[in-house]
């Protein structure tokens, strides 16, 4: 229990410090991801979840950009966006239910789709910049969090009292 608690507390605190010091307020999804990947409470579980989260974000962004490309100049027409958004939600919800593993690829895609269409899409702004920014910030946050998680995991295993599994 010591290993997991110290690992989670260290990575979460470092994530918070980085996002506060560099004033990354527009990357709240990336910061949330750095915390969500720690839910399994061990290195192998965090790595598995990080892969699922990255894949879900990638799929959600690609779907959003595909809708943007399909609609092109008509992305400001709500009556065209809603059916495509609904199709995406149904596909990703089905994937989420079929995974039956909590927050996996389907959940990551659903949350990405919800944020892209709910927060960033407006009649005066397209999804391209927002989608690519979300994808890149989330992937960078996942990679950085996994690097810190691995370093802390290895450091904690150097001491008998904090060794994983003991």
Image: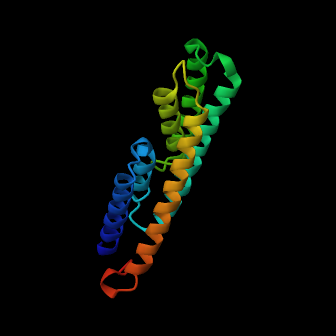
Q: Decide if residue 43 is in sight here.
A: no
Point 47% across, 33% down: residue: 115
x then y, percent, for residue 35: 39, 55
Question: Relative to 80, is 13 on the left or the right?
Answer: left
Q: Decide if residue 126 is in sight here.
A: yes
The C terminus appears in which quarter of the rendering?
A: bottom left
Q: Is residue 124 above or below residue 152?
A: above
Point 54% across, 35% down: residue: 130
Question: Relative to 120, is 77 on the left or the right?
Answer: right
x then y, percent, for residue 16: 34, 56
Question: Relative to 72, is 122 on the left or the right?
Answer: left
Front-most of 76 and 64? 76
Locate residue 127: give its quadrant.
Answer: top right
Point 40% across, 49% down: residue: 32
Front-most of 69 and 40? 69
Locate residue 8: give its quadrant.
Answer: bottom left
x then y, percent, for residue 136: 57, 48
Front-most of 126 and 6? 126
The N terminus appears in which quarter of the rendering?
A: bottom left
Point 57% across, 12% down: residue: 79
């Amino acid at each position: 229990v010591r290993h997991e608690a110290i690992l989670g507390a260290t990575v979460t605190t470092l994530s918070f410090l980085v996002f506060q010091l560099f004033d990354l307020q527009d990357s709240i999804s990336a910061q949330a991801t750095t915390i969500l990947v720690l839910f399994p409470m061990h290195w192998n579980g965090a790595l598995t979840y990080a892969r699922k989260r990255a894949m879900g974000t990638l799929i959600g962004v690609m779907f959003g950009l595909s809708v943007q490309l399909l609609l092109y100049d008509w992305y400001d027409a709500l009556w065209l966006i809603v059916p495509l958004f609904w199709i995406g939600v149904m596909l990703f919800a089905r994937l989420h239910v079929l995974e039956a593993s909590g927050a996996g690829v389907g959940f990551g895609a659903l949350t990405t789709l919800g944020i892209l269409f709910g927060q960033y899409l407006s009649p005066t702004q397209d999804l391209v910049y927002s989608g690519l920014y979300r994808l890149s910030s989330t992937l960078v946050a996942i990679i950085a969090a996994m690097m810190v998680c691995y370093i802390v995991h290895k450091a904690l295993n150097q001491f008998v009292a904090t060794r994983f599994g003991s």
